[in-house]
Amino acid sequence: MNLKIIRMAILILLVCLISCNAYSDKINWHSYDEGLKLAQTENKKVFLHFWAAWCGYCTKMATQTFKDASVADYLNKNFISVKVNTDKEKALAVKYKVKGLPDTWFLTGEGEPISDIGGYIPPGKLLPVLKYISTDSYKTQKFNKFMKF
């Protein structure tokens, strides 16, 4: 009986370890304050992502969108990525008027808002938006025109 319990515990531990390794972050996430400082220092825009552990679409973004190699690589090269848990950092959620989750913001290197997107964003839709923002195309043309190229 005890041997069965030990085997089951080992099996559960192995499954947990494999799952945790498969979903380890590829994105270099930062805290809000650290991210804003780095953005100024590195002259990069901020990718600001609001989430919560109980949010199903937040989990979907974490396990699908943020695990996509092209999205992770693009974010790491062109943005300072900041992840904010709204349950733990409620003041920031209020500051950005977060009404639903997930909620994603883009900020200038000085911390000024550029734009936001509410809800789940699949990898294939996020990558063009990242390029639109990082290239400053948002300053001279609408997103639809940018996508025609």
Image (cartoon, rainbow, N blue to C red):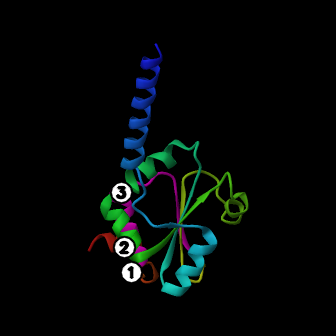
Give the residue type that dot 3 points to. Answer: Pro
Q: Residues within 10 Å of mark 1 (few under 14, many from 20)?
A: few
How far apart are the alpha carbons under marks 2 and 1?
6 Å
- SS at circle 2: helix
Residue 135 image label? 1
Report the side of 123 relative to 87 (left or right).
left
Residue highlighted by disc 2: 131
Q: Residues within 10 Å of mark 2 (few under 14, many from 20)?
A: some
Q: Is residue 141 visible?
A: no
Q: Which residues are magenta?
A: 113-135
Nearer-N-terminus badge (3/2)? 3
- Residue 19 in which image quadrant: top left
Residue 111 magenta: no
Residue highlighted by disc 3: 123
Q: Residues within 10 Å of mark 3 (few under 14, many from 20)?
A: some
Where residue 92 appears, as percent x and y from the top left, is: 68, 64
- SS at circle 1: loop
How many tags in the picture? 3
Front residue (pair 92, 136): 92
Report the side of 1 relative to 100 (left or right).
left
How far apart are the alpha carbons under marks 3 and 2?
12 Å
Give the residue type that dot 1 points to. Answer: Thr
> Residue 104, relative to residue 131: is it above or below?
above
Where residue 76 appears, as percent x and y from the top left, is: 40, 71
Residue 116 magenta: yes
Q: Is residue 83 visible?
A: yes
How far apart are the alpha carbons under marks 1 and 3?
18 Å
